[in-house]
Amino acid sequence: MATTPGNAINETTTGICGFTGTAFTGTAVTQHGQLVGGATSSTLTNLGVASNGQLPIGSSGADPTLAVPTSTGGAFTTGAGSLLYIPSNYTDGYSNIGITYSAGTFTVNSASGSAFSATNPGYVVFNNGTTPGQLVTISVTANQTFTDGSGGSTATQRFGLIASDVWGANDIPFFLYAVQKSDQTAIAFMISRNPAAKVAPAAASIGQSGSIVNVGQNDFFSLAAITTSQYAAQPCVFLGCFRMRFVGATNSWTVQTLSTADGIGRNYDNTTFNFPVAVQGAAAGTFFLANGGTAPIYTNQACSYNVMRNGTVTLYYNCNTNSTAGVGAVTAKLTTPYIQPSTFLYNGGAEFIATGSNTIFSFGLESDSTPQPRIMFWQSGIVGFTANTTFAANTQFKITASYEPFLGT
């Protein structure tokens, strides 16, 4: 270094100049690189050139690191000069939402299983209940829960089942919804047996801890303490599914251990459930209604069903080896897992076999205000419905039937 007249400095060091107090130093510069303070007050550190989407990520007591941010439950998409965050399940209308079940408590929390918070919120995109045609995004910053068992918050809310019915070790499908508050400031998570709801039911059909309702199979139960009128008939978003079992002795529910078939973003379109005998108004040991005569009973009898996301239910009955013949000139009626709201809405077929001869029956689903869903049969050319006496010894039958018990919800 040489001095020139007027106390000017002629510094030949390359890079960005720094002065230590006794000497000048130079920090090399890389085109497009990022500089931060170095080990001393007179030096700089070159972090290098960031690639698409990279940001300087701080590290206590050390130089930042160039990296693309990571996320649990979402993903970042990078480009030249751009960084886009796409939450998980964003296209389904929600993000960062998960469920857990432990020690009798069912919890809606973040996608990773950690608690919601102001810094770890979940989001749900709703149809705008105030301005139709628009959307509104609402966040949730606190977990919501319910407890199962005879002393749990859901005890005695039957969701359309008959009190004291024994469903035994048969799982019952349930569905989780997010429901917007009418002023669009909050979300209540609710559960229901209805997989096809677009809006929450009336206030009288929304239960919560300490305020149980038993209107029917379309009832909701809110995990949060709410004023039900503020959520009634408000838009809801389907989130996922889980299974519970009904304990008729206490009219309570037990959540089943979550499996890969359960969870957020799941449905039961490809899952088969079993429907037991002697429930929903059926006589002991059979699927047939106790209706004043003697209901037929079959030694080998089974009924399974599927519940689709769109609300369609398909039933499969297979009954053979009659052990108790039907008695009485009363209409034979098979019970079903769900009540049909409209008379004779069905799609399917029935085959009845008596002593080696096959007969194809027609059938319909009878609607009724009482919680006793049922299928009735009739034969071509015969006036009236098929009676109990038709299901005699040496008979067997098979039925496949699809219907829409949640139509209009």
Image: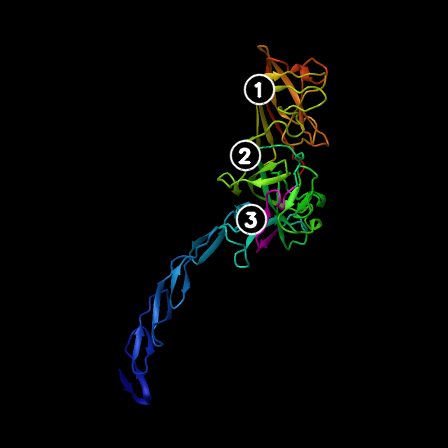
Q: Which mark is first along the chain, 3 or 2?
A: 3
* Residue toward you, 330 or 168: 168
Q: Residue furthest bottom?
A: 6
Q: Label 3 belongs to which residue?
A: 107
Residue positioned 34% across, 75% down in the render: 40
Q: Position of residue 47 (x, y in %)?
A: 35, 65
> Which quadrant is home to the C terminus?
top right
SS type, badge 1: strand
Q: Position of residue 159 (x, y in %)?
A: 65, 38
**Rendered position, 214 above or below 5:** above
* Residue toward you, 404 or 225: 225
Q: Which mark is first along the chain, 1 or 3?
A: 3
Q: Position of residue 378 (x, y in %)?
A: 68, 18
* Amino acid type at image mark 3: Thr
Instruction: Answer left or right for 208 relative to 69.
Output: right
Say if residue 35 shows up in the picture.
yes
Q: Label 2 belongs to which residue?
A: 269
Say if residue 93 shows up in the picture.
no
**Crowding near the residue tagged with mark 2, few <14, some 14–19, many ≥20 C-alpha atoms within 10 Å:** some
Residue positioned 65% across, 21% down in the render: 363
Q: Which residues are magenta?
A: 135-155
